[in-house]
């Protein structure tokens, strides 16, 4: 589990085809203190398993499924990426619940200055539009952000100067493709409501659409 608070930018040092997927040689932009072989590190929002950790360098295998859903396959050697180590129980929870499992790719459709801030507008596949809500959370290339406005397959976020400096979001331009992870809570709610009375456990539950609406979840 991650929070979407990026620890720093790393870079892709090398890549090679392996077993239908790709093996990445990566270098973190920060010290990997107390490294654990097999630990999870989010790279551009994608949860990857790190091995052969030496100093700031480590390897990760990227599966065909991950390549099909994310922008990792298009990364060139030398390119920077956002990195975050997995959450520890003692850490501050500064962002939102991020699993590191990318839902889809989105595209930057607009970038404009708003005073000291930068407003980005993204498009995403229509089937994921329902999971993005105004003032809700979304992870873009692993960065936890708050949605300003949304609808019709687009949404906008306002990014502070600090975030542009310390993440790859500052490099985004119209046409750039990004990894998107929608808020997982919405998907679980949809799944529970969709089970209906066909499930004995759900049919006896007091949690339904009316309950969620009364308590401000819908």
Image: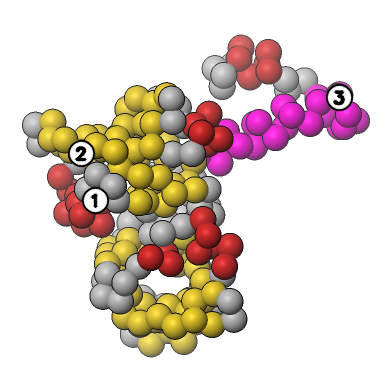
Which residue carries the number 1 mark?
A: 172
Residues drawn in magenta? 183-205
Colour setting: secondary structure
Which residue carries the number 2 mark?
A: 111
Residue 111 % position (x, y) = 20, 38
Q: Is residue 124 above or below residue 34?
A: above
Which residue carries the number 3 mark?
A: 197
Q: Which of labels 2 and 3 is toward the front?
A: 2
From the image, which quarter does the C terminus lie in?
A: top right
Instruction: Count the labels in the image.
Output: 3
Mark found first going from the N terminus, 1 or 3: 1
Choose between 115 and 176: the one closer to the eye: 176
Quadrant housing residue 152: top left
Residue 44 % position (x, y) = 38, 59
Q: Is residue 122 above or below residue 83?
A: above
Residue 194 belongs to the span the image colors magenta = yes
Residue 28 seen in this snapshot: no
Residue 3 % position (x, y) = 43, 50
Tag 2 near tag 1, CB within 8 Å: yes
How far apart, in angstroms, are the residues tagged by discs 2 and 1?
A: 8 Å
């Amino acid at each position: 589990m991650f929070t979407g608070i990026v620890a720093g930018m790393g870079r892709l040092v090398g890549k090679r085809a392996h077993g239908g997927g790709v093996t990445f040689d990566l270098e973190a932009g920060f010290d990997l203190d107390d490294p654990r072989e097999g630990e999870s590190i989010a790279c551009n929002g994608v949860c990857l398993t790190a091995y052969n950790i030496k100093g700031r360098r480590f390897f990760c295998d990227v599966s065909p499924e991950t390549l099909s859903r994310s922008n990792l396959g298009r990364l060139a050697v030398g390119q920077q990426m956002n990195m975050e180590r997995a959450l520890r129980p003692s850490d501050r929870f500064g962002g939102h619940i991020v699993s590191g499992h990318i839902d889809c790719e989105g595209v930057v459709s607009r970038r404009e200055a708003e005073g000291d801030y930068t407003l980005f507008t993204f498009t995403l596949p229509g089937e994921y539009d329902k999971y993005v809500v105004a003032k809700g959370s979304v992870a873009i290339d692993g960065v936890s952000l708050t949605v300003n406005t949304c609808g019709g397959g687009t949404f906008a976020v306002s990014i502070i100067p600090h975030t542009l400096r310390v993440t790859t979001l500052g490099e985004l331009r119209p046409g750039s493709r990004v990894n998107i992870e929608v808020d997982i809570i919405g998907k679980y709610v949809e799944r529970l409501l969709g089970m209906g009375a066909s499930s004995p456990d759900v049919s006896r539950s007091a949690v339904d659409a009316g309950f969620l609406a009364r308590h401000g979840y819908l």
